[in-house]
Amino acid sequence: MNKEQELKNIVKERYTTIAEQGKAENASSCCGATTSSNKVYNIMMDDYSATKGYVEDADLGLGCGLPTQFAKIKSGDTVIDLGSGAGNDAFVARHETGAAGKVIGIDFTPIMIEKARANADKLGYNNVEFREGDIDNMPVSDNTADVIVSNCVLNLVPNKTKVISEIHRVLKPSGHFSISDVVLVGELPQALKEDAEMYAGCVAGAIQKSEYIQTIENQGFKNVTIQKEKPIVIPDDILKKYLSTEEVEAFNTKTTGIFSITVYAEKQGGFKSITTNNSNTCTPGGGCC
């Protein structure tokens, strides 16, 4: 078994456990992966409770942002939610796209798919579906989505370049994405890094923010924009297990550390081949000539 598959198996096992826990357990110990602090902290997730389309039963407390808030979803859009979990972001997206649109959630954990489908059935949503599969090899045809959203998932995937490439493939020309994720800024103390990764959204592979943005640009996306950025606040009682008082103070300045970012980017539009007097001319609006 290769390293990437081993990491995927670890994440799948972890998220199977998460699906069987309650939201409070997931909030107090990141993804249920480690012993919680002596206080209950929800160190990552933004508050969804006032968001239109929010479904409490579908909220497992696992996100690190509100990507749907920034995703510019319009009525009738086809939206794909990567790492859809129990369906929370998919249902918020469904509120925006309406009955005329379609939402596809993708997750590779079977129990999450079961939970999401059960929630969709309870809500009577016949235009929201959930597909089991890897987000670096999506069970979706080319040029399907107007919008892609994702909430704190890409950091868990070993091959981020492959995921970004897949996002580019399944977006329609001129489609766009809004993704919330965890990134690093600067080098963390090694003693802290392994524990901090567990607390920062069960990070199996967060990378430097600059590398994250460059990976998106390298796949041909344009207008790459950070829509929101916030530090992931790790409780001091955890930091003090690994760092001196001076190091804790330095870490809390956030010149280095772990951050949640929401990133927006657009796929370029295509071109249409027009034949006039035996000559081909490319014009905006269609397939590439």
Image (spheres, helix red, strand yellow):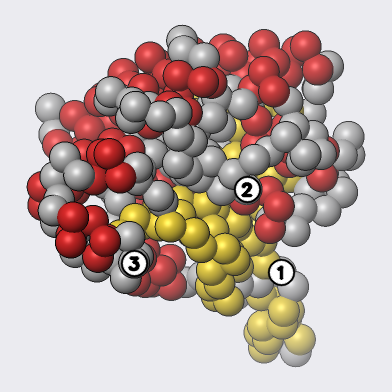
Q: Secondary structure at mark 3?
A: loop
- The amino acid at mark 1 is Gly
* Label 2 SS: loop
At 68% from the left edge and 48% from the top edge, which residue is drawn?
68
The reply to whether residue 229 is in sight is: yes
Q: In the rendered view, would you say 256 is above or below 24?
A: below
Q: Amino acid at mark 2?
A: Leu
- Which residue is tagged 3? 253
Tell me where residue 224 appears, x and y as whole percent.
53, 72
Q: Which residue is mark 1?
A: 286
Q: In this rendering, would 89 be left or right of 259? A: right
Cβ atoms under marks 3 and 1 closer than 8 Å: no
| Distance between the alpha carbons at the discs numbered 1 and 2 | 32 Å
Q: Residue 33 in the image: x percent, y percent? A: 30, 25
- Give the residue at x 60% y 32%: 105
Coordinates of residue 226 in the picture (x, y in percent): 54, 68
Q: Viewer-nearest of labels 1 and 2?
A: 2
Of the two numbered discs 3 and 2 on the same chain, state the one appearing first in sequence.
2
Q: Quadrant of residue 272?
A: bottom right
- Give yes or no for contact between labels 1 and 2 (Cβ–Cβ under 8 Å): no
Horizontally, residue 121 falls left or right of residue 61, namely: right
Residue 57 drawn above or below residue 216: above
What percent of the width, then of the height, locates residue 284?
A: 72, 79
**Mark 3 residue type:** Thr
Q: Residues within 10 Å of mark 2 (few under 14, many from 20)?
A: many
When asked about the image quadrant of residue 57, the answer is top right
